[in-house]
Image: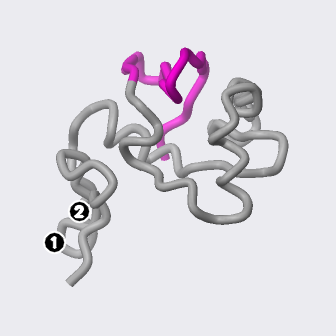
Amino acid sequence: MKKIIEVKTSPLMNLWLKFSDGLVGEFCFSDYFKCDTDISRKLLDPTYFSKVKVNNEFGCIEWPNGYDPDPDVLYAIISKQKIIVNEKVVFDPSQGRDAWVRE
């Protein structure tokens, strides 16, 4: 698992992340996450979105309500690498909100 060691927010739902292996990058959260569930809708509020913190115990980011996107997915977004499981692409960050590959 990739560990996040630092996070910063900027306007328009942008996240800047630094990983333990030195990878650094920024992306627009809403380009990849729909925020269409009860727990994720709060992230649409810029004040709430800015409350994201690094959970050092687990190496992830999280919001006060417990929303915590998978660090491996965030790493794939920043590094622009696909996630492959059992020789099949399951996540392709070049597809934005449609990054989860469904067959």
Residue 32 - label: none
| 60 relative to 86, above or below | above
Q: Which residue is found at the position 48% from the left and 55% from the top?
A: 34
Task: Say what amino acid the circle numbered 1 marks.
Answer: Glu
User: Is 42 left, or right, of 14 in this rendering?
Assistant: right
Residue extending furthest toward the right: 64
Q: Which residue is found at the position 33% from the left and 54% from the top?
A: 97
Residue 87 - label: 1
User: Which of the pair 93/97 is nearer the observer?
Assistant: 97
Q: Which residue is found at the position 28% from the left and 60% from the top?
A: 98
SS category of the residue bearing label 1: loop
Task: Say what amino acid the circle numbered 2 marks.
Answer: Ile
Q: Which residue is found at the position 41% from the left and 16% from the top?
A: 22
* Colour convention of the picture: one colour
Query: In the image, which residues are magenta?
Result: 1-26
Q: Which residue is mark 2?
A: 84
Q: Are marks 2 and 1 in contact (CB under 8 Å)?
A: yes
Q: Position of residue 51 (x, y in %)?
A: 76, 27
